Amino acid sequence: MAGSFVPSSAVSVDTLDWGGLGWVVNPTTAPGSDLTVLDVTIQPGQGHDFHRHPRQEEVIHVLSGAIEQWIEERHERLGPGDSVHVPTDTVHASFVADDADEPAHLLVVLTPSVTDVGYEAVDVADEAPWNDLRS
């Protein structure tokens, strides 16, 4: 594989209730790559609620803003330059405070690339104990 240049104009963005996912590297933009790289924005008062990736490990790196990052039942505040490693099939979530001055902007890397889009997630936000952790 010779590598792939991915100009910003080639990054498709999915708009979600909580923010956006920009597909930087996945099977579409870099055929044969074993990485999925996302440019993620989480709006103030929103979050990517508790979920897990059954076949992928993940690194979340905060570019700007701040998040309340959960790994299972532990959480920490992460700001610009901070990162977290999430092992395969580990429940986690990322939230931005209601009173935040700006969205959080994250660089997210998952490996291996799975499915036709390079990503799979299982939502567990409505299951115990995850549905009561932030109450």
Image (cartoon, rainbow, N blue to C red):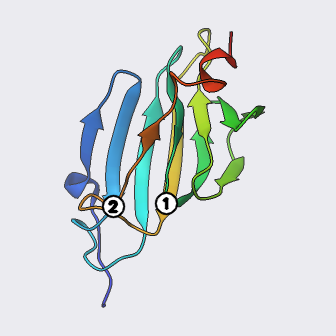
Disc number for residue 60 = none
Instruction: Pick whichever of labels 2 and 1 is earlier in the sequence.
Output: 1
Secondary structure category for the residue under label 2:
loop
Query: Which quadrant of the view contains residue 94?
Result: top right
Disc 2 residue type (three-letter): Gly
Q: Are marks 2 and 1 in contact (CB under 8 Å)?
A: yes
User: Residue 85 placed where, x, y %?
Assistant: 67, 55
Task: Give the crowd class for mark 2: few <14, some 14-19, many >=20 residues within 10 Å.
Answer: many
Question: Which residue ends up furthest to the front in the rendered image?
Answer: 128
Q: Name the residue under label 2.
A: 118
Q: Which residue is drawn at 65% across and 57% down?
A: 87
Q: Name the residue under label 1.
A: 110
Nearer the observer, 38 or 91: 91
Nearer the observer, 122 or 21: 122
**In this picture, residue 106 sits left or right of residue 77:** left
Q: Residue at x 36, y 34 (%)?
A: 20
User: Residue 47 placed where, x, y %?
Assistant: 51, 25
Q: Quadrant of the N terminus?
A: bottom left
Q: Quadrant of the C terminus?
A: top right
Disc 1 residue type (three-letter): Leu
